[in-house]
Image (cartoon, grey):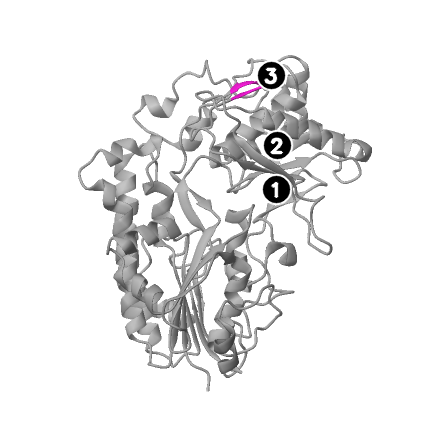
Amino acid sequence: MPKPLIAVWLDAGDAGLIRQWMAEGHLPHLDAIRREGLDAPLRSFDHSLAETVQQFVLTGQPPDRTGFWSQMGFNPAHYRIEFSPLYDFSEYPPFYALGPGRRVCALDCPQMQFHGAVDGIQLRGWGSHGPMCDFASVPPQTAADILANEGMHPNNGNDYAVLQKSETLESILQAGLRGVDLRRSVLRRLWHQGPWDLFFAVFSEIHVVGHYLIEHPSNQPYFQQPGSSHSLREVYARTDAALGELRSLLPPDGHIAVFSVEGMKQNSDELASIALLPELLFRFSFPGSHAMDFENAPPSPESLQGQFDWVMETWNLRRRPPAWTRLLDRWLPPDWAARAALRLGAGGTLRHPAQFDVMNYQPTLWYSSYWRWMKAFVLPSFSDGFIRINLRGREAHGIVDPDDYDRTCGEIEELLHALQDPASGRPVVQRVIRARGTAASGAKPHPADLVVLWDRPDPCGHVHSPCGTLGPFPGIRAGMHVPDGFLFAAGPRIPAGLRLPERPVTQLHATLFDLMETTPPSPLPGPSLLPAPAQAAAA
């Protein structure tokens, strides 16, 4: 008879911090799982990490199989970003869709659709980071019971802070600590509604807090306060205690698996991808023009009133167009007005963030009026830089001939590799991936033609370029994701002290199915991490 498995996703749990704090005795329950069973470092995807890990965890399938490379699709007919955050499971079901008779509880996964082949409970949109879905459950009574017993998670609709405002950082910390306690209560109650074959739970609080409470040049006032240096560790320790209680509920024949598929370190890439890169490609496409004026921007109206808003501070860096351009705005569509102003010598005129329904904080979108006239432009992202060539025959107004595609990619790569850190003079681009040209046979294409992997650029997006000095920008988030994960697992079928070298993250789900002693709903991309004797015992 199958044995129960508790699978816990520590969303953005950082392997380096966890190993350090286990060694120092701050995470005893995680360390016990690791010591008594399997410790496997996992290597996640080389690029597009922040956009793809959610659907990878849900399905067990990498993005070149699902085609889910980003929550933001690009419509080449209209040069428009289309927000599609949820994978529809049409080709690959969620890994926990085990079918009738296999009882499953799947709790609070980000960007989650419900699936009919799950026999049990599904909960979404309660306290996950970036849920991109409504708060609901199957059956509906589960959500109603949570509201009646624990209430709404304090991070729901409130997982953002301002690095430059210490009170918002303290608020996000307290919300994370309170959120872990509430999640612990939810998990305890729902466990007792079993028995379960699979109890799949997500802890997102360390993800939210990690984005703001890793030390960064922009949040130094917070870390000058007494006791603040241990703030992030507090949330990990509170999560560890919840894991200890959850493990104590397992029967002797059960297994527990705790994993993360990405970590967190000081954020240096995000501003480079979403703010620096759009301005660089604007200047590349329109030599002599610029849309940002880093040296002459006046203080923002918000800052003069003692307020700080990242979007408006960054918007304040824009070049101010002459007053006569308002006539163009009145009589022409936005794209044509912007183009006319540029041709008449007014420089770049960016679209106001308020004109966009979603992702309006991303400067990439503010340049969208010019996309149809640019050789290449930047798509919104959460991690690496996504560059799309304005290709004739693919884009409605493409200007790069297909015969010039490789040459244009080469020009942009040369421009990117010329970017330098102002302080040290070292290059800040690690490599540029031709995302469409290097795809494996049968792989589903990336929306970008070029993916830019950065090499520790200035955390505030300050670089020297052949198109002039760009930045600095105000800091947006303190932590960014890195492709370092782990799997710790313990139970009667796993030898104590089993240590493995780093393995690809695509072996994670096969290992979970080995522990469940069942067949996955769709073929998985990698083998189990369990040694052969354990696999044989499952047969």
Tell me which label, 3 or 2, sits earlier in the chain. 3
SS under mark 1: strand
Q: Tell me the crowding category of disc 2: few under 14, some 14 to 19, or many 20 or more residues within 10 angstroms, Cα based.
A: many
Vertically, is 209 above or below 141? above
Q: Which residues are magenta?
A: 464-469
Residue placed most toward the observer, 494 or 480: 494
Vertically, is 192 above or below 85? below
Q: Tell me the crowding category of disc 3: few under 14, some 14 to 19, or many 20 or more residues within 10 angstroms, Cα based.
A: many
Q: Which residue is mark 1?
A: 81
- What is the quadrant of residue 213 in the picture? top left
Residue placed most toward the observer, 311 or 62: 62
Image coordinates for residue 133, horizontal then vertical, percent: 48, 56
Numbered tag placed on residue 368 in the rendering: 2
Q: Which residue is pictured at 60% across the width and 55% down the height?
A: 63
Asked if the residue at tag 2 contacts the one at tag 3, i.e. Cβ–Cβ closer than 8 Å, the answer is no
Asked if the residue at tag 1 contacts the one at tag 2, i.e. Cβ–Cβ closer than 8 Å, the answer is yes
Q: Amino acid at mark 1?
A: Ile
Tell me which label, 2 or 1, sits earlier in the chain. 1
- What is the quadrant of residue 169 in the picture? top left
Q: Which residue is mark 3?
A: 347
